[in-house]
Image (cartoon, rainbow, N blue to C red):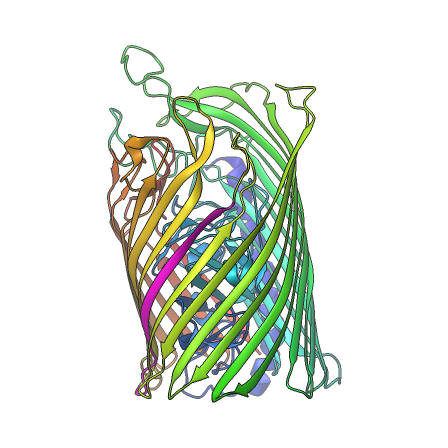
Amino acid sequence: MHGQTKGLILKAQLLTGVAVVGLAIAMPASAQEATELKPVIIQGEAGNANSEATATSPVKGYVAKRSTTGSKSDTPLKEIPQSVSVVGSVEMHDRGVVNKVDEALSYTPGVNAKPFGNDGDTDWFYIRGFDATQTGVFMDGLNLFSYGFGGFQIDPFMLERVEVLKGPASVLYGGSNPGGIVNLVRKRPTDEPLFYTEIGVNSNGNAFTGVDLSDEVGSSDTMTYRLTGKVAGGDNYSDFSHDLRGFIMPQLTIVPDDATMINVWGYVGVLDQVHTGNGFFPYEGTVTDAPFGKIPRDAFLGEPDIDQGNYAQHMIGYELKHAFDNGWKITQSARYGHLRKHEIGPYGFGYLNTTDPTNPNYYWLNRIGFEHRSKVDSFSVDNRAENEFDFGGTTHNVMLGIDYKYYRLDHIQAASAATPINPTDPVYGDPQPANNSYLNQVITQRQVGAYVQDQIRFGEGWLATLNGRYDYVDTETHNGPTFWAPIQDFTYSYDKTAFSGRAGLAYEFANGLTPYVGVATFFNPIVATSLTPNIKPEEGNQIEAGIKYEPTFIDGAISASLFEIRKKNVVVTDPSTMLSSQLGEVRSRGFEFESKANLTDSWKAIAGFSYTDLEITEDTNSALVGNTPYLQPKVQASLWLDYAVLRGALEGISVGGGVRYQGWSWADNENNKKVPGAAVFDAAIRYEKENWGASLNVTNLFDKEYVKGCGGLSTCGYGDARTITFKLSKKW
């Protein structure tokens, strides 16, 4: 290893040592208590309660029964006329999810997480075939919208749940990804005292330490606090790649009476890294052999002395709830966020010469020098009122709301033709040309929406859900001077209105079975980057039918659904003129199955399967019509089993294992090159006794080398290498 990398390993070791001291401080208290745990399952890293009191409470084991994501109110999952998946902190702990949110969804059907493999500063999600990374990520129901490189990244340690609403969400949240959204639910102050700390390190030499504390404020019986924080750093599996990251999130909840709750929170997160080399490898040399064989999975094709990426992100927010005597309940939540992000370094992009074997640069890689600076300011607020009343033999749960989103991105991007590099024997240090700015923009988007929802119960088990929403969106793009256009200074703006709706019908049988059918429309505003006049949002609709089943004989939840989504007004580029227009249409249809169960006090299980058939139905390039877009596998499947020993000599030991399978996908929209499917196995073993916990998780147990996906023949990424993570934790 090079000296710089060794230095990062040393930093990781120092972090681990500091955390050990923190754990040692807690040891006297645990020695005094000397109380052995009862034979029950330890619910996650923070000793979460074993019941789901509300839709934001800790999930009981693996099985969530309630959610806010599909209705914006605390609603049983079986009453939502769309498919919803919930991954709780217990499941994340058992599967060894440490640094990235997209890791949490690797067992969720219908979600293609990390489609390019590992990317240290971005969480990638494709849902039902559509990219949700920028327009489909929310936190506590408020949009975490991003454009370009102006996106926030959240650490899973600060989350209680990761929830996925599949299919259109515009009727609740305004403009968003048609395939679905990911809603990140923060941890909140607990009713009971909570004191938790952990340390860990993985086989790459990347260490972490975290604390999670919650209790009453002094002797107050109306105020509780929670302080959650984490520091991580060390090497990554790519040569030269390393990082140092961390966050802290303090919050305070005030409950002055039974009718009122106020939660105020803040957050600061930072990252400093040298990027992983993954994601910009060519198809030939990864999926198939090049004349030299394969590009090593840990290859770094940048410049170690130039490459760097860092961000500093800040948030502050609050949530207010109040119930009136007349039955109305109001909720207001708001969040302001600020982000500064900078990245620089060359990356590979296709081969320089593949035709002349006598050329000394035969099968060397082109490189593009790149740099960007991005600054984001965002603000979101959501106001809603709810009430329940009877009318004409029906029961109505009505919600009225208004929300507002503001997003401003000030960014500069620059590039150059960097020096080529040998992919199997790279030599670093050649002088690189200066990057020249080609983009200098300030993009501002404002959205205000008014919405209504009525959940109607009638007959003996019928439930109808009706939603309507009206949005106004204003987008302004100011283009400033660049290297290539030094006197450029013009602004393009447009505003649009959009209506979206949803209607669902379900019937709840006494045995826990709930069949449902639903239709929904959506829109997704486009930041104008084309020459198309009269820019329109992407629009379309979904039809979904399914079954949700909560058995009466076990603690479990099973769902199955059929769906079809049509997305219109897709921006496509005419290859003959290189001009963009909104003449594209993509259809997604498929089937999804998901089962989660706390089978017994010892056994927990997850099973999932999805079939997603994508088709380009309209395009300016007629040769693409009927083809399948690249990157998305048609078939995905997963299975995870977890067993805890509750008594006997091995009491406290838990073992878990799972398999993730993705079928083949296309590497290009022309459908000429395929990426083979792959099955990857994971395993875990844990020991928990007297408030101490130790765990060992292994992802990609057999170290299978495979390509996760290709977004074109020059942008392929390897799937995760085998990684062993050890963690030691303490509750007191």
Q: Is residue 600 above or below residue 700?
A: below
* Residue 422 image point, x, y percent: 38, 23
Q: For this rendering, which residue is in front, 193 or 8?
A: 193
Residue 227's spot in the image, x, y percent? 65, 68
What is the x, y in percent for residue 409?
A: 65, 42
Look at the image and tell me whether residue 93 can be seen.
Answer: no
Dominant SS of magenta comes to strand
Q: Residue furthest top?
A: 358
Q: Residue at x 39, y 43 (%)?
A: 116
Question: Horizontal placement of 342 versus 176: left or right?
Answer: right
Horizontal and vertical percent position of residue 242: 51, 43
Res 520 seen here: yes
In-image side of 669 versus 2 (left or right): left
Which image quadrant is residue 495 in? top right
Residue for point 24% across, 43% down: 676
Q: Nearer the viewer, residue 82 or 672?
A: 82
Magenta-tinted stretch: 537-553
Which quadrant holds the N terminus?
A: top left
The structure residue drawn at horizontal position 36% and vertical position 35%, both measured from the top left corner, is 619
Residue 69 painted magenta? no
659 vs 25, left or right, is: left
Q: Can you tell which quarter of the image residue 217 is in?
A: bottom right
Q: Is residue 552 magenta?
A: yes
Quadrant for the C terminus, please: bottom right
